[in-house]
Amino acid sequence: MIIKVCGMKYADNIRALDQLKPDMTGFIFHHTSPRYVEKVPEYMPSSSLRIGVFVNSDTDYILYKVSEFGLNLVQLHGNESPEQCRAIRSKGIDIIKTFSLKAADADTLTAPYDGLCRYYLFDTPCAAYGGSGKTFDWTLTQSYHGNTPFLLSGGIRPESLEQISSFRHPSFAGIDINSGFETAPGLKDIEAIAEFIKRLRTL
C-alpha cells in the first residue's frame, strides 16, 4: 500500500519523516494554504518520491517548481483540464489528479482524464481547496470502475486503521495523510506517523 504524507514544510520535520521511508512526501504550492512552501527547505526527502501539490496553477509555474524542488510527480488539486494534464505529461511528468466525491459519480468525473494520470486521489468535498480534514463516504468510490489506481485522502487519522483495513476496491492503491497527524499546520507528529506506518504495513 502506498503511503503519502502531504503538507510537509520544515527541514527537521522532513528529515525525521524521511527516516520512516514513506512512499511519497508532499509539498503544497497553493499560496493560501497554511502549509504553503515558499522556498526549498534545507533538507529534502531522499527516500521517497517528492510530490508537488498545485491548485489551478499555470503550467509554466508548475514546471518551474518541478525543476526548483526536484519533484517526481505533481498533484493537481483544482479544476485543471485534461488538456493541461496532457501538456504536463508531454514534459515527462507524472500526475496525481484529485477529485472530490460527493455523489456516486466517480466514473463521470474521471473519464476525461483516462490515460493522462498515474494516480487519482479521491478526497472530501469542501469550500476551500486543499482538503477539509474530514472523512468522506468511502463507499462512493465504488462508483469508480477505471483502470487508473487511486489514493484515498480526507480526514485519515491514527484511529482510521480499522476503516482502511476493511476497505476493498480493485483499484485502491494507498492513502494520503496530512492534518490528522499534525501538531500544527505543516508540522507532523513523527511518533504518531511511525506507529501508524508500522501498523499499516502489517495489514
Image (spheres, helix red, strand yellow):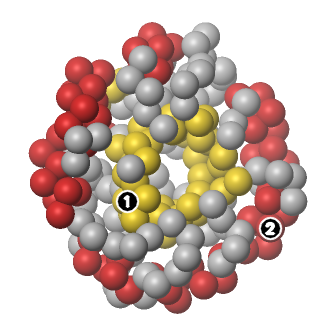
Circle on res. 163: none
Q: Tag 1 or tag 2, which sits nearer the N-term?
A: 2
- Is 114 in front, or is 186? 114
Question: Which element is circle 1 on?
Answer: strand
Give percent across and percent down for residue 52.
Answer: 62, 42
Res 171 seen here = yes
Tell me if 9 is positioned left or right of 193 in this view. right
Residue designated by label 1: 152
Q: Residue at x 46, y 84 (%)?
A: 145
Q: Residue at x 87, y 59 (%)?
A: 90
- Is 95 in front, or is 35? 95
Q: Identity of the amino acid at label 2?
A: Arg
Q: Residue at x 46, y 21 (%)?
A: 18
Give percent across and percent down for residue 181.
Answer: 27, 34
Q: Is residue 85 above or below residue 130?
A: below
Q: Is residue 81 above or below residue 178?
A: below
Res 27 seen here = no
Residue 103 figure quarter = bottom left
Q: Is residue 121 above or below residue 188?
A: below
Near mark 1 (Cα within 10 A), the count class, few <14, some 14-19 or many ≥20, is many
Give percent across and percent down for residue 42.
Answer: 61, 10
Residue designated by label 2: 86
Question: Which element is circle 2 on?
Answer: helix
In contact (CB < 8 Å): disc 2 and disc 1: no
